[in-house]
Image: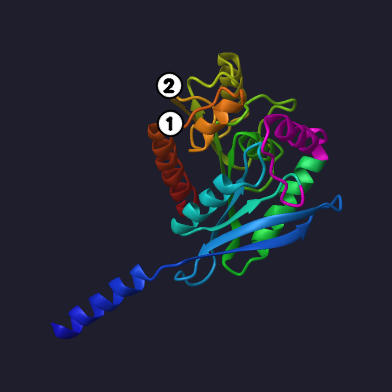
């Protein structure tokens, strides 16, 4: 009995000692741009585990994206918050953020090459199972992960949080390899009802394993606690604790089911 109790205490102590390791990793995109990735993982987990790419909001690779990467690492994933703008650029003003975003989206090949550079970096990490990769994107990043799914990038699943849903290249039957989850704010003035209807029709027509969750009263950027402060910059955004927590729970279950199948 004493030995069993001792073993239990040791196990509890080990669990309590779980620690999330983080580090910045420089890498280079195909176009020669220097990028900065933020890798997070639980070092008490032995061996490779599924990887999740985190794609930032239109502000750039800021604290929100890094915090989400750490939280996903706590779920048992090897996570990499990637840099879509280059050199870790982060905007403070909406005009700068919009300019960064438009430059990253202007050329579809640039967008894809920067995403793939981050994906390949994550796959090379010893903590990552390179055959099991998912992606989660916020705002601008939500659009990016949806576009990568549409293009047939070999991802197990993608989750878009308050992302733009419009596209110039709709998914075609058989092209999408990933499961798709869209977490949408019902009060998001940046996404129209027509946009929501269009992506749903697109995904159904393309035969995608797809789900859209609409959160009542949630505005754009509902997962970011800094959204309330950012609203003072002329943006129709707001943090919504309930939508944030519920969408996180949806994502947690989504990736668990995706990687367990």
Magenta span of residues = 86-109
Q: As drawn, is 29 to the left or to the right of 247?
A: right
Pointers 2 and 1 in contact (C-beta within 8 Å) = yes
- Location of mark 2 (residue): 217
- Residue furthest bottom as drawn: 3
Magenta stretch: residue 95 in it?
Answer: yes
Residue 140 lies, in percent from the top left, at 65, 35
- Residue furthest right as drawn: 32
Q: Secondary structure at mark 1?
A: loop
- Location of mark 1 (residue): 240
Residue 170 lies, in percent from the top left, at 70, 27
In this picture, is 17 found above or below 173?
below
Magenta stretch: residue 20 in it?
Answer: no
| Residue drawn at (48%, 38%) of the image | 225
User: Residue 7 sits in which quadrant?
Assistant: bottom left
Q: As drawn, is 252 to the left or to the right of 10?
A: right
Name the residue nearer the viewer: 248 or 64: 64
User: Residue 157 sits in which quadrant?
Assistant: top right
Name the residue nearer the viewer: 150 or 56: 56
| Residue drawn at (24%, 75%) of the image | 8
| Residue drawn at (44%, 47%) of the image | 257
Quadrant into which the N terminus falls: bottom left
Q: As drawn, is 107 to the left or to the right of 185?
A: right
Q: Is residue 56 visible?
A: yes
Give the number of the disc on residue 146.
Answer: none
Q: Is residue 172 visible?
A: no
In this picture, is 204 found above or below 32?
above
User: Residue 180 sits in which quadrant?
Assistant: top right
- Residue furthest top as drawn: 194
Q: Residues within 10 Å of mark 2 (few under 14, many from 20)?
A: few
């Amino acid at each position: 009995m004493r030995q069993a109790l001792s073993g239990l205490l040791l196990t509890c102590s080990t669990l309590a000692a779980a620690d999330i390791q983080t580090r910045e990793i420089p890498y280079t995109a195909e176009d020669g741009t220097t990028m900065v990735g933020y890798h997070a993982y639980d070092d008490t987990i032995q061996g490779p585990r599924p990887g999740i790419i985190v794609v930032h909001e239109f502000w750039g690779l800021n604290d929100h994206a890094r915090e989400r990467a750490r939280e996903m690492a706590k779920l048992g994933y090897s996570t990499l918050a990637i840099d879509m703008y280059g050199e870790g650029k982060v905007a403070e003003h909406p005009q700068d953020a919009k300019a960064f975003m438009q430059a990253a989206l202007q050329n579809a090949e640039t967008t894809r090459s920067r995403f793939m550079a981050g994906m390949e970096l994550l796959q090379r990490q010893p903590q990552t199972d390179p055959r099991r990769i998912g992606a989660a994107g916020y705002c601008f990043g939500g659009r990016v992960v949806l576009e990568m799914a549409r293009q047939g990038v070999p991802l197990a699943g993608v989750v878009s949080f308050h992302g733009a849903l419009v596209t110039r290249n709709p998914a075609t039957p058989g092209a999408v390899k990933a499961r798709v989850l869209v977490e949408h704010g019902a009060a998001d003035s940046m996404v129209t009802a027509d946009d929501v209807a269009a992506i749903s029709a697109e995904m159904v027509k393309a035969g995608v394993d797809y789900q859209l969750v609409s959160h009542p009263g949630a505005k754009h950027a509902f997962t970011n606690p800094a959204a309330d402060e950012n609203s003072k910059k002329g943006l129709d955004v707001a943090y919504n604790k309930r939508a944030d927590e519920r969408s996180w729970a949806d994502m947690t279950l989504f990736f668990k089911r995706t990687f367990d199948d």
